Image (spheres, rainbow, N blue to C red):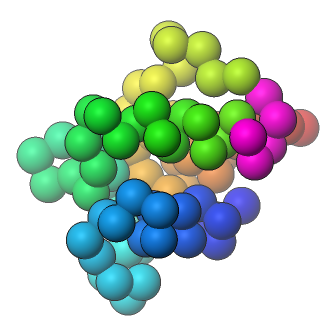
Amino acid sequence: MHDPIRNFLLNELDAGLTDDELENDTPLFGHHGVIDSLAILDVVTFLETTWGFQVQAHEVVDDHFGSIDRLAAFVASRTG
């Protein structure tokens, strides 16, 4: 699950980082984050479309969306 998420962040969101710079634990939000609050809607849409589940508003938190590792774990928990 890591590769599709990484590719989306690098290619679709234009995260401003190279593949070498975007590690699985790179913070995605906050002061040093890779994406802004508007881009989160694109991430949610990507997850829902790619893995076929709905993301609830209360799930859009740092524990689930804080890094590629956290996103992959969140997807795994929702898909099974």
Taking the spot 75% from the left edge, 48% from the top edge, the residue there is 50
Q: Is residue 79 left or right of residue 14?
A: right
Q: Residue furthest bottom?
A: 20
* Quarter of the figure with residue 76: top right
Q: Considering the image in quadrants, where does the N terminus appear?
A: bottom right
In this rendering, position of residue 51 left or right of residue 3: right
Which residue is located at x 22 percent, y 52 percent? 33
Residue at point 48%, 41% (across, down): 42
Question: Going by the image, does 74 lie left or right of 50?
Answer: left
Q: Tell me where residue 7 appears, x and y as whole percent.
A: 55, 71
Up/down of 21 relative to 78, above or below: below
x and y percentages locating residue 66 in the rendered image: 39, 44
Is 77 inside the magenta-drawn segment? Answer: no
Does the rendering let one see residue 77?
no
Q: Is residue 52 magenta?
A: yes
User: Is 29 in front, or is 36?
Assistant: 36
Q: Quadrant of residue 32?
A: bottom left
Check the image and report above or below for 21 versus 50.
below
Identify the image quadrant of the C terminus: top right
What residue is shown at x 51% (from left), y 13% (from top)? 57
Work out which residue is located at the far right of the displayed protein and give it.
80
- Image spot of residue 59 (x, y percent): 53, 20
| Residue 60 can be seen, yes or no | yes
Q: Main secondary structure of the magenta part?
A: helix
Q: In the displayed image of the protein, which residue is found farthest to the left?
A: 31
Please count the marks in the image: 0
| Residue 23 coordinates in the image, percent (x, y) | 41, 73
What span is colored magenta in the figure?
Answer: 49-53
Considering depth in this image, is 69 or 11 the residue closer to the camera? 11
